[in-house]
């Protein structure tokens, strides 16, 4: 069964960068991987997507210049790196698979807690 | 502040029904049927419950149903069970950027 396995929790200082991984045990063409985050007490917020096959990306305007999504096809891993961290970046970061040609996510990772604190 | 508005919490006794609302605007819920619902238990991956307003993926109990009227979508849980105690959030396509918006989430408590 396909799963998305995310890396463990991270604690970072303000101004640092964090790189969260999302390992998929198989890639199916047409499925893009999206990244969302959920701050405490709030709903999820969409950050962007990556095409695991081509590496193409699209980022939410809010995160342009601070986020980079990449993949390593040799180990079926996807990465989301967020730089210049601030305290309000503290959140649970999710990767999720979007069903092709529709607007819903049929598979999610468990989330990676990123805490930004000095 | 989330783009879609949900009540912070709802509760019900075992066997009862509860309904969670998800209110958007004419640029999202009000104009498109691309509304989905997710269930999240603590420390677990969110699970897709409903897609395209009222469609259940295989594996979702028929106790969960979705509907939409105007700018408000709803998720109804019938025959409430203790395992339904979780957070639920909605999502919709939006014609404005970002094109995927979410609700703030609703905590369901089984009394």
Image (spheres, coloured by chain):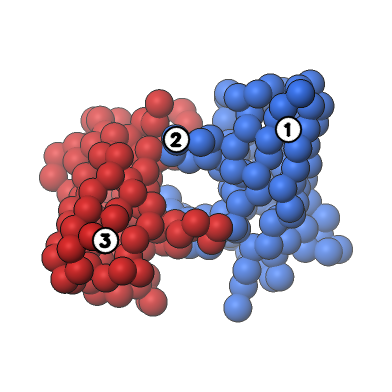
Chain colours: A blue, B red
Q: Position of residue B105 (x, y in %)?
A: 37, 43
In front here: A24 or B85? B85
Q: Is residue A93 left or right of residue B2?
A: right
The N terminus of chain A: image quadrant: bottom right
Residue at image mark 1: A82
What chain is tagged by disc 2?
A: A
Task: Judge from the rendering whether residue A58 lies leftward or rightward of residue A101; answer left or right.
Answer: right
Label whose residue precedes the other's in the sequence (1 or 2):
2
The answer to which of B68 and B79 lies nearer the viewer is B79
The mark closer to the camera, 3 or 1, is 3
Dot 3 corresponds to which residue?
A: B110
Q: Quadrant of residue A3?
A: bottom right
- The quarter of the rendered structure image containing the C terminus of chain A is top right
Q: Residue at x 61, y 52 (%)?
A: A111
| Mark whose residue sits in front, 2 or 3 | 3
User: Could you say whether the residue bearing mark 1 is in a helix, strand or loop?
Assistant: strand
């Amino acid at each position: 069964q396909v799963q998305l396995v995310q890396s463990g929790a991270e604690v970072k200082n303000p101004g640092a960068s964090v790189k969260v991984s999302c390992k998929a045990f198989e890639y199916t063409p047409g499925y893009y991987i999206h990244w969302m985050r959920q701050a405490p007490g709030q709903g999820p917020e969409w950050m962007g997507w990556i095409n695991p096959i081509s590496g193409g990306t699209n980022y939410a305007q809010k995160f342009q210049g601070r986020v980079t999504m990449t993949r390593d096809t040799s180990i079926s891993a996807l990465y989301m790196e967020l730089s210049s961290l601030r305290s309000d970046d503290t959140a649970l970061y999710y990767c999720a698979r979007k069903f092709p040609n529709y607007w819903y996510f049929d598979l999610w990772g468990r989330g990676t807690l990123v805490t930004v604190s000095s | 502040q989330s783009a879609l508005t949900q009540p912070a919490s709802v509760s019900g006794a075992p066997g009862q029904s509860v309904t969670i609302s998800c209110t958007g605007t004419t640029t999202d819920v009000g104009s498109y049927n691309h509304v989905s619902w997710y269930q999240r238990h603590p420390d677990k991956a969110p699970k897709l419950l409903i897609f395209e307003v009222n469609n259940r993926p295989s594996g979702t109990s028929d106790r969960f149903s979705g509907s939409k009227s105007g700018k408000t979508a709803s998720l109804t849980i019938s025959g409430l069970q203790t395992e339904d105690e979780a957070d639920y959030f909605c999502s919709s396509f939006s014609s404005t950027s970002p094109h995927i918006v979410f609700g703030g989430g609703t905590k369901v408590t089984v009394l």
